[in-house]
Image (cartoon, rainbow, N blue to C red):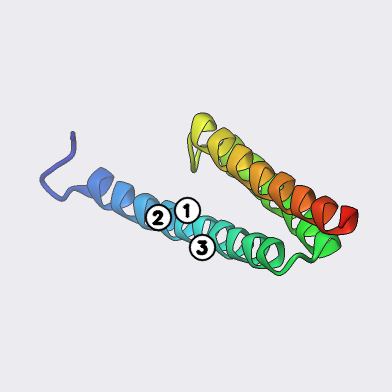
């Protein structure tokens, strides 16, 4: 870390870091909320709601990756797990319909 002594540049970096931290926290909180909504809809078996929430969740993940807030592999892992959840929900619905 350069600019340790509290000079003008160090104060500016502190301001910039505080703004970035607030922005990143807000984006991650929104992703967490979308994730919870998706899994809640999937657990309840609401296919249309779950698919809508899935699209919003994936879009949010992609935007977070683009902004550098989360890593690409992290987003890919979360998308994969969400898709698996939807697939299991669809399989369960198909099994119920077959009975």
Determine crowd level at label 3: few under 14, some 14-19, many 20+ residues with C-alpha closer than 10 A.
few
In which quadrant of the rendered view does residue 62 lie? Answer: top right
Question: Which residue is found at the position 57% from the left and 56% from the top?
Answer: 31
Could you tell me which secondary element the residue under label 2 belongs to? helix
Q: Is residue 58 left or right of residue 8?
A: right
Indicate which disc residue 29 carries: 3
- Among numbered discs 3 and 2, the one appearing first in the sequence: 2
Could you tell me which secondary element the residue under label 1 belongs to? helix
Which of these two is toward me, 19 or 82? 82
Q: Seen from this angle, which residue lies furthest left?
A: 5
Per the image, the residue denoted by label 2 is 21
Which of these two is toward me, 70 or 55? 55
The spot of residue 2 in percent (x, y) is 18, 34
Q: Are marks 1 and 2 in contact (CB under 8 Å)?
A: yes
Per the image, the residue denoted by label 1 is 24
Question: Which residue is found at the position 53% from the left and 60% from the top?
Answer: 32
Could you tell me which secondary element the residue under label 3 belongs to? helix
Question: Which residue is found at the position 65% from the left and 49% from the top?
Answer: 85
The spot of residue 92 in percent (x, y) is 75, 54
């Amino acid at each position: 870390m350069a600019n340790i002594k509290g000079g003008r540049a160090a104060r500016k970096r502190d301001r910039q870091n505080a703004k970035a931290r607030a922005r990143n926290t807000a984006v991650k909180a929104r992703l967490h909320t979308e994730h919870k909504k998706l899994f809640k809809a999937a657990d309840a078996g609401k296919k249309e709601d779950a698919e809508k929430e899935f699209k919003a969740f994936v879009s949010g993940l992609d935007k977070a990756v683009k902004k550098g807030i989360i890593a690409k592999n992290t987003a890919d892992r979360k998308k994969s797990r969400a898709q698996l959840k939807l697939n299991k929900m669809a399989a369960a619905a198909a099994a119920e319909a077959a009975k």
